[in-house]
Image (cartoon, coloured by chain):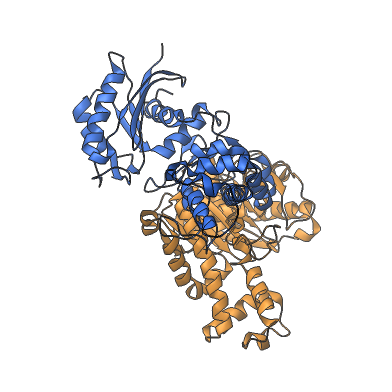
Chain colours: A orange, B blue
Amino acid sequence: MGKIAIGCDIGGTNLRGALIREDGHIIKRQSILSEADKGIDFVVKNLANLIQQTIKGDDIAGVGIGIPGIIDSSKGILTQAPNINNVNNYPLRDVLIEKIGESVPVFIENDANCVAIGEWWVGAGKDVKSLIILTLGTGVGGGIILNGDLWNGADGMAGEIGHITIYPDGAKCNCGNFGCLESYASAGAIRRMVKQGLETDLETIIREKVKNTSKERIPEIVREAAMQEDKFALWIWDEFGKALGIAIANLVNLLNVEMVVIGGGLANAWELFIDRAKKEAKKRGLRAPIKRVKIVKSVLGDDAGILGAGYLVFKEEGII
Amino acid sequence: MGKIAIGCDIGGTNLRGALIREDGHIIKRQSILSEADKGIDFVVKNLANLIQQTIKGDDIAGVGIGIPGIIDSSKGILTQAPNINNVNNYPLRDVLIEKIGESVPVFIENDANCVAIGEWWVGAGKDVKSLIILTLGTGVGGGIILNGDLWNGADGMAGEIGHITIYPDGAKCNCGNFGCLESYASAGAIRRMVKQGLETDLETIIREKVKNTSKERIPEIVREAAMQEDKFALWIWDEFGKALGIAIANLVNLLNVEMVVIGGGLANAWELFIDRAKKEAKKRGLRAPIKRVKIVKSVLGDDAGILGAGYLVFKEEGII
């Protein structure tokens, strides 16, 4: 039997961990609450418990951790993490090693980058050398694999695809800029378009469906309405797909990668936006690169991040 | 004394070659006409002559060639070259080796990529590991260096920064797309803006100056007019700088590189566009990456490409 790594994913609600074989097979899973609202110290205490529960007697090559935030992976420092309280240059690796012991090497990386690594290693991109992943969820995340290596940039911040400008005078983004991809192709963007549409007197079944519902459900409501041919809902997914297509053309013209993988919760509305996205990308892409690139849906879903985190261990330890 | 390489640059008008030391010093230069209008066979005949004239008894580690077009560098094939007649998957390396002999290794690469390598090796970027170069001339070229390596993409076409979309409904580009960077920040873009402006009745000293002049001189006329505070000319450079700034923010958010180098003939109008470009980039860039990135002018000028071509030889032959 080959080596085993632990891959972890730190979410705002749950911590998930898994034992991963060096062939990319998951052999055990664990999940506990992260308690991110109580601050980073609670998260790390829970993470140490999760790791110890997951190990239980197994001989482990190391622990890889994907975390939403800005990471200095060489130093193991969590520079910033918008969804966890009290984080400011937090020495995550050192604190964790104090708890779980020095015998297990620890590697940390941004969660979207782990997703990119996972999809490249054993997912949609397992037969290519270069890919870009876009994760469409609350916001838009991204990760870049070139020549089989993660490109994470001079500050660990490469791959912020959600913040490339699509419409210079477009809608305001959470980052402060205007017209970012994230303002057109995320759950937040869908909520903005719904809100703005409902302020007019246009006819749509969405108007009735969003009453007394949580804002988290709105993208799903818009998906259902589009399946029922609601014109406003179809227009929203068309805007979504167009912005995504412009972004894909930019990525392809710039990086000439073999594949663009689209994941995240909103990828479940695939058939509502992908044709428009591909059409727009084809219109704007240079001939050879756009002909070459495969635009595909992520295949690993929620497992991509923990698998990518596990791969980091095998790679850094020289196992694969 | 260390090894010596030949670096060549194939232009539409001239072929330039130089003997380059492994410390990046140029010790001899040659230049002859390329005769690109007579077709690729003439160009290669002239190139072989240039190389033989340049070598003259020196012991050469190899020849590196930068060429405007799409290159399959692993096979030494010139896939397409818009400025040279009769090119369609032309086996440049093999044909050249037939003429100059097998004892001298030959490496070919896209000319903009050679410029990026040159500036990284011994130019503006000699102290950084990652940079992007934009060359602003007739069109907009680009090259990407990540971790000290050229990223040239799955088809050798990465770095086509001129064809990222800045304004989705903007001016038509030569590539067929709309609103590309090249339609706003190139000599062609300046000519378009001048033409469109002069079709109205706005007052500008450009109107008189462009009479009876060649179209090649128009960017220089617009530069001179801006130096004289002509409002229309200043507006043109402002549009130019704004588009460039949006592109730079996209590059920095996506790739988190340490440096953006701006070269090409239009970089001589630096003070007319750079403040606007930096302001726009800062507005749209994510905090840490945009704070980190240095936006600088190329320092090697026309020598960047031949130096980059020479570096390819030293790198591929394992000399440096």
Q: Which quadrant of the figure contains the N terminus of chain B?
A: top left
Measuring from the top left, give residue B301's x and y in whole percent.
Answer: 49, 30
Q: Residue furthest top?
A: B1
Q: B144 or A38, which lies in front?
A: B144
Query: Which quarter of the picture shows residue A240?
Result: bottom right
A52 or A278, which is in the foreground?
A278
Q: Residue at x 62, y 75 (%)?
A: A219
Q: Does residue A306 appear anywhere in the picture? A: no
Q: Residue A36: horizontal and vertical position, in percent?
A: 75, 59
Q: Is residue B256 visible?
A: yes
Location of residue A103 in the rendering, given as x and y in whole percent from the top left corner: 63, 39
Q: Is residue A43 left or right of residue B105?
A: right
Q: Residue at x 46, y 59 (%)?
A: B172
Q: Nearer the viewer, residue B41 or B249?
A: B41
Answer with left or right where residue A239 lies relative to residue A293: right
Q: Residue, x 76% and y 50% (percent of image)?
A: A87
Residue B315's place in the image compared with A98, above or below, is above
Residue B294 sits in quarter: top right
Front residue of A90/B138: it is B138
Up-down: is B37 above or below A119? Answer: above
Q: Is residue A27 left or right of residue B6?
A: right
**Where the C terminus of chain B falls, by quadrant?**
top left
Numbered circles on residues, count: 0
Residue A233: horizontal and vertical position, in percent?
A: 57, 80
Above/below status of B228 relative to A37:
above
